Image (cartoon, helix red, strand yellow):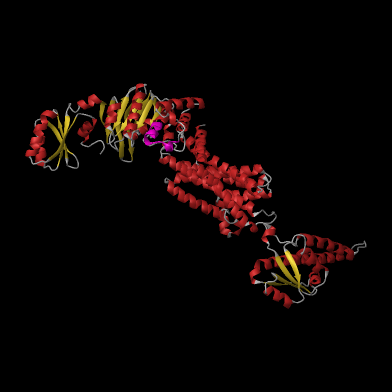
Amino acid sequence: MLEVKNIKKSYGKMKIVDNVSFTIEKGESFGLLGPNGAGKSTTISMICGLIPYDQGEITISGNSVKKSPMAIKKKIGVVPQEIALYPTMSARDNLLFWGKLYGLSGSQASKRAAEVLEFVGLKDRAKGKIETFSGGMKRRINIGAALMHEPEVLIMDEPTVGIDPQSRNHILETVKKLNEKGITIIYTSHYMEEVEYLCNRVGIMDHGQIIALGTQLELCKRLGGGSIVQLTVENHTEQGVEAINILESVEKILPQEDGMVLDIFVQNPHGALGQIVTTAVNQGIRILSVNVQEPNLESLFLQLTGRSLRD
Amino acid sequence: MKFFIISFKDFKVRISDKKGFISLLVMPIILTAILGSALSGMFSGNAFMPHTTVGVVVYSEDNLTRQFLDEVLQGEELKDTISLKTFDSEKSLKAEVKQQKVDVGLLIPLGWGNGLLTGEIRDLKVFADPGQELQSSIIESISTSFIESVTSVSISSRVFSTHLATTASTSAQQFDVEEASTDVTNQLAIIAGTNRQSVVMEEEGKPAISGMQYYSAAMGAMFVLFNATIGAKSIIQERTTETLARLMNGPIRRYSIILGKFLGTLYLSFLQFIVFITSTHFLFGVDWGNNLLQTVVIGLAYSVAVSGLAMIIAGLITEEKTADTVGGIGVQIFALLGGSMIPIAAFPGVLQQLANFTPNKWVLESLVEIMNGTTWNSLILPITILVLTGFVSLVLGSLRMKLR
């Protein structure tokens, strides 16, 4: 369905996207994770045909993005991070406008707008002006506008930024339903729990490169099924950290940047916990709290980069 | 044709902003009413000349003197504006002028009329109160005009008589020189007396327009110009909210988006122009001339220019606030230079030349011409300049325009 093959993009000497490749199958829900500046948005923009790539190739259903951008654009719907709607126009008028731009006739756009409003749960607010809507409602119409032309691929760039948990859940359910209808989803986010919930496969980007790619299960296996014991401490010494690191049950220890949190990668947290705490106390480290994290994308990212996703 | 969808959306968004739209319509109408009424005297011949009491001492009793008093100063055109008051002596006249009982004093010396005919010109004396400079200069101007007319007639008739006399002496035919010269003199005197003794208060060859007419055109031109800022701000706003980027995500070419934005501004500018013309016509009785099509075409050409300027501003400026400031100042400079505040004729030569670079100068001048009655030929230049300004600005703005 979508193939990204060895694409590169540089601005001057700065490599923004460096040899990125991945494929997405029809009907798949693919998550693109990464911190700010990782190159996610540039990659998405290149898929949409907004930014030309320097090298490589992107194809959707066999059509090259570079060679036939208009044909590609008709197949994809983009939900931008910003609320890209006209605030003084009604929800319905906004949808009609975007529908007509994608080639729907007046009656087609009207029929489709009604369906979309129903789908995003805002049928009753069809005539309400966008500027009078809550953040969550605006986000829903923002998604609706991208659905007007019934795209084959829906690209969502952090669609839940800055909204309340209830609206966020509504949007996640909406995305889930769209994927169940057969729409291919590309979902970018800082929130790994959203990606974990929605996506079959995940690509993790950092410094313009894909550093991990696969299903969630495959990726978590890269952690060896291990967990992270997170110690929040008042103080620690190099000697103390090293004493924990050489414990048999510990694979790796990464002090976080503020130095007050130690991320300790272990295979069996329950067996290792006692040893870690005892060693720490013996080394004069004062522990404030202990937290055990099950293997997830966040811990994988941490292990791969030494940084948190939201850093 | 996706640019039509974009332009109609823009038009709809802007007219739904009732506050902004009403202020764009109501403000120029209010300003027109104020300026048109307050400054109407600058444009109307009768209104320009305030009522004037002229004190006269007449020592001369010939025909020309009587003609000057009865047919010029008290003729059809001026009898309602000028009151004549006769005095016996120069001394009493001066006293009255000093006491401001009369506005201007005029002393006609003995043999003045005959002196003009024989070429021995005798000057009129004009006494003016320092506070009535305008009236005294007008009376002086009327008098000078009359003197020049009569003098030129008498000189030309004398030359003609001499010439005829010379020619007749070489002819075999009998020729009554005296009769011929009298005839010619009479004919010329009629022409001189009727056509040349008025004060010209407007530009050569053009009838006067009223202050209300001028300021209607001026305010219309100025307020339509504001659409350049409004149009530019709309583009900058869409760039900020990323609706422009979203448009780029769709199957729409860049030129369609830019053309759509251009047309959106054009529709609004033109609508504002039409509404303004209609409102001023029905509210203030402004006569926009006899050729509505000319007015509409010049309005359309101006809207093209204004919409082009919006694209230039949007291409050069990225911040809405900056566009507001630059646009506001720009409109004021253009309005001032283009004659929307003060007629261009009042400017020094350099500024008049600079005015040629303002689109509102061309539209204002054209509208005034249309009010006076003009031909399509004379409108070709302003229409071409306005349309070219619009399209060149559109191209330049498009080259600079960042949609994302």
Q: Is residue A134 magenta?
A: yes
User: Residue B72 location in percent, x, y?
Assistant: 77, 64
**Residue B306 in the figure: left or right of residue B102:** left
Q: Is residue A22 magenta?
A: no
**Residue A261 in the figure: left or right of residue A104:** left
Q: Which residues are magenta?
A: A129-142
B139, above or below B15, in the image: below
Task: Decide which of B176, B211 is in the foreground and name it.
Answer: B211
Q: Quadrant of residue B157?
A: bottom right
Q: Quadrant of residue A61?
A: top left
Residue B259 seen in render:
no
Most distant residue in the bottom direction? B91
Q: Quadrant of residue A5?
A: top left
User: Residue B181 location in percent, x, y?
Assistant: 86, 64
B364, above or below A222, in the image: below
At a point 38% along the width and 23% down the height, the residue shown is A62
| Magenta highlight: main SS | helix
User: Residue B127 location in percent, x, y?
Assistant: 69, 73
Most distant residue in the front direction? A124
Disc tally is 0
